[in-house]
Amino acid sequence: MTNQSTQILLIDDDPIFRLGLVTALAAFADLEVVAEVDTATAALERLTTLLPQEQVNLIILDLALGRSLGSPLTGLSLCQQLKTDYPDLPILLLSAPSEPNQLAAAKGLGVEGYCAKGCAITLIVEAIGQVKAGQSYWQMLPIPTHSLPPPRWHNQLRQSGLQQIEAALRQVTAQLQQGNLSRLDWLFWTGRRRELLTARWIVNQLLPTDGAIVPSDNNYAEPLPRLTSSSPRPPVPQTSLRQSSTSALSKTSSEALQFQPSTPQGMTLTKLDSSLANLTNTPLEIDILQVERRRELLRTILYKFEEMLDALRFSQVTREQLTQKRSRLLHDLWHVSLTDFFGQYSTLAVGNQMIEMVDILRQNRDIVQRAILDKIPLVIELVANRLFESPLMIDNVSYPAHTPEAMARAELLLQNLIIQVANGVIQPLLNSFSDVEIVKHNFYDKRLISSREITRFRNNLSWKYRRDELVDEPRSIFESRYNLFVLSDIGIKKVAIYSPRRQELEELQGTQLAVTIAYEIRDAIAPRLRGIVGWVGKGVVYVLTQVLGRGIGLILRGVIQGVGSAWQDTWFSKNGERGK
């Protein structure tokens, strides 16, 4: 190996692609892939062992790393980490040219080169040489774009295809997670997963989320206009919510803002048109609603949140004041959303009385605040990001407001916020009017309309709150994470994000503290206990097979031989008597 040779660390989560690239590069004497990994975490760990010996002088990386598996540290995050920790180590992106904004963001971070997957190996070798020499190599970098919203049939066709692909991907992933797969089975399921990922890429290319594509001069999505008390308020584009059913509890649809499709609120609004089925094992209050009512409520909260942000901009609130106003902001958002969804003057006939529905629901304010609203995480961070373009911390890395990673995190926080506030809106309804017929007819899913199903549903919610308070929340604090409910193309799912929660951990008391101690003891004892059980198990197997098994085998063999000898003696004795 000469000093001019190039030692490469290959980072890609597709094992078949890694195998093909390593084989192709082996034909070039001055190129050597010294290590290959499939995750960002494994790459950082491997670099700590390789770089002190100067065994790596170039990285080849797939920008889409970790997205198909939902990894919190994706390719773009890894680029930023590498450029922070190893600024002199060149990076060549070898990715599909499907996301121009992501590529532009990577170039802005200082990444030296890019080649599209599928290009000729000679082109890749040329890019490697140019990047290693300290030059930039960007092969046909796509122009960042923004777009107009597509028609409704377009979204339905795209969602139908993606739902089938995602369902098949989950089955394939479950198969790959089995530890007893043979090499042949592993190759089969890996190839199947690659086919599905390719199919998903093709669907995204042929049926993109954006309709009419127009060039954009910006690398990132445009932010919403900032408003101050001295600046004129721009005209607000108007659209309408869907009409609710015409009944005693119906209300006319409210008007809503229209968002840029590439912003977190625009992406959230698009996902509200897809399935809103609960894909988690955790019951949610909004599960009892009809699908259209569920969609209407989430839309209402999204619009009210945007109106609240406009009010905060107009009042020129400071970053420090947001923390003091957190509970008030969440309460106000819940209050206006509840009023708008049910109707300010809706009345119910209960017996001989006419009851003001909203007034009764508001009496549950303290319960909702304590059980739901106060537990919504990172609300101030989300509001500050929208108002002051504050950066967001993701895995202890600070991302500026309009980077793709920060926008993706803001989208998750926004979706969790509107889902949790929606739960808070429906909880008083279940507490006060759960079995009122007109409420069931206008709001509830038909599968949950009987008194028995409603009681079962409420019991499940009650157990959820007990488990969350005593077990799940202490565990999340101990593991330094938040569980978020977010929207996907196929329904509501749960994701976990890392966030330091040291202060909350120190404040735990009673049963919650005991739960964290139990987990700590389990973490300390479980590996040793498994080792002891494994050792004892091997001893038992040895005694049963080598000692008792062989002894029983010898006894059985002796018995069989004795029976055989006796049979032979009897047979020869009879033949001898016949001869006489």
Image (cartoon, helix red, strand yellow):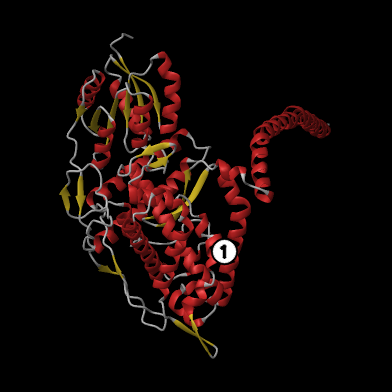
Residue 29 spot, x, y in % from top left: 28, 14
* Kind of residue at badge 1: Leu
The spot of residue 350 in percent (x, y) is: 53, 86
Q: Looking at the image, which is closer to me, 388 or 488?
A: 388
Residue annotated with mark 1: 461
Q: On the picture, is 472 further left or further right than 222?
A: right
Compared with residue 138, is residue 332 higher up or lower down, i.e. above or below?
Answer: below
Q: Which residue is drawn at 37% across and 68% down?
A: 296
Q: Which residue lies furthest to the front in this view?
A: 230
Q: Kindly identify the residue that appears in the image at 59 percent across and 43 percent down.
A: 505
Is residue 168 in sight in this rendering? no
Q: Can residue 272 be seen in this view?
A: yes
Q: In this view, does 554 lie above or below 261?
A: above
Residue occupying image coordinates x 30% and y 23%: 90
Q: Quadrant of residue 33?
A: top left
Looking at the rendering, in which quadrant would you find the N terminus?
top left
Percent of width and height locating residue 508: 63, 47
Q: Quick one: which residue is furthest to the bottom in this view?
A: 352
Relative to 375, say whether 41 is above or below. above
Q: Is residue 402 above or below residue 350?
A: above
Front residue of 314/44: it is 314
- Residue at 45% from the left image edge and 56% from the top image edge: 325
Give the secondary structure at mark 1: helix
Toward the viewer: 269 or 565? Answer: 269
**Left or right: where does residue 63 sit relative to residue 542?**
left
- Image quadrant holding the C terminus, namely top right
The x, y position of residue 436, in whole percent, is 52, 80
Q: In which quarter of the image is residue 184?
A: top left
